Amino acid sequence: MKAAAFAYARATSVDEALTLLAAHGDRAKVLSGGQSLMPAMNLRLISPELVIDIGGIAELRRITLEGKVLRVGALTRHVDLQRSPEIAAHAPLLAEAIGHVAHPAIRNRGTIGGSLAHADPAAELPACMLALGATMVVRGKRGERRIDAADFFEGIFQTALSAEELLVAIEVPIPQRDSLHFFHEFARRHGDYAIAGLAAQAVIAAGVFQDLRLAFFAVGDRPMLAGAARKLVNAAVTPGLLSEVAASLDQELDPHDDQQASAAMRRHLAKVLLRRCVATLLDRPEFAESAA
Ligand SMILES: Cc1cc2nc3c(=O)[nH]c(=O)nc-3n(C[C@H](O)[C@H](O)[C@H](O)COP(=O)(O)OP(=O)(O)OC[C@H]3O[C@@H](n4cnc5c(N)ncnc54)[C@H](O)[C@@H]3O)c2cc1C
């Protein structure tokens, strides 16, 4: 199938893109890498009247270190994240996760801003944003606002962005020096969207979690920070406590059935991920072996 006819405009600045968005609202769609937008248009799931190509706006394609924050421009491509020494040094969770996003051809064009604005609940990067406590920098004609990642994702393909706003950057607080991360996903094949996944960021001292952020994905209509993680912080982790936390995931997660997996299987996999994560971060392999 081919996309329905549409008009095309290439914005050369953020201001120009915002003027076009203000004039056309939800009849327009922003084009970044096109790796999600174009398939959706070709399948006629969406048919915008106007496509606003922001791909050439150089100021949105930068990674800069600003004090204790890593600022990543929305047009930074997946491959740029993968190759960035700043990301490797200060946000290794992202560097690891990106290798699970699709395949090299898609990573060469797809952007972080496109992935976050698209808000696929099975995507890796939205969950990483939650685990890292990132902030979305959003600009509209009336100015800029900052939205916590935890408030940005509102549902399947839904975010806090209005039709007249652009995601311009992501601010990632640099994790403290002794932070650790964990990333794992179950997928049919490497590069496929996850059936269930977990991105986590932790601080550990003397074998005890001082902080633990567990961001599950593909187990609900949006990525989710597990509140149950709090029970593991400042606590002596035992198999019993871990089982309690695993059980409370049942209340927190809201997975769906589809052709890839049942909701029950996704719940089971989330618990397996939790155990593997805690076992890896605490270097206690026996925790991964307990019954899920
Ligand atoms: C075969 C295949 C496999 C894939 N597998 C995975 C996978 O495993 N994991 C995964 O996470 N992704 C996967 N993807 C999606 C891929 O990562 C996309 O690159 C990404 O989701 C969107 O980035 P993009 O720059 O291409 O965005 P686009 O396709 O250009 O845009 C996506 C959406 O976001 C909006 N948008 C884009 N940029 C902005 C902005 N700055 N501000 C506001 N709105 C904006 C667009 O209007 C559109 O609605 C896959 C894609 C394909 C084709």
Image (cartoon, rainbow, N blue to C red):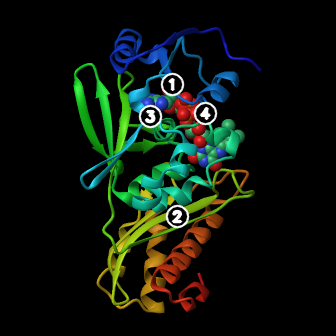
Type of amino acid under label 4: Ser
Q: CA distance from mark 3 to mark 1?
A: 9 Å
Residue 233 rendering spot, x and y as whole percentages: 32, 79
- Queried on whether the Cβ of the residue with tag 3 lies below 8 angstroms from ligand 1, the answer reads no
Type of amino acid under label 1: Gly
Type of amino acid under label 3: Arg
Q: On the rendered structure, is 289 left or right of 153?
A: right
Q: Quadrant of residue 145?
A: top left
Q: Which mark is residue 61?
A: 3
Residue toward you, 32 or 120: 32
Q: Is residue 111 above or below residue 166?
A: below
**Residue lying at 44% horizontally and 74% vertically, measured from the top left:** 248
Element type at mark 1: loop
Other residues around mark 3 within 10 Å, as few (<14) / some (14–19) / many (≥20): many
Q: Is residue 176 above or below residue 59?
A: below
Residue toward you, 92 or 4: 92
Q: Looking at the image, is mark 1 or mark 2 earlier in the sequence?
A: 1
Q: Looking at the image, is mark 4 or mark 3 earlier in the sequence?
A: 4
Element type at mark 3: loop
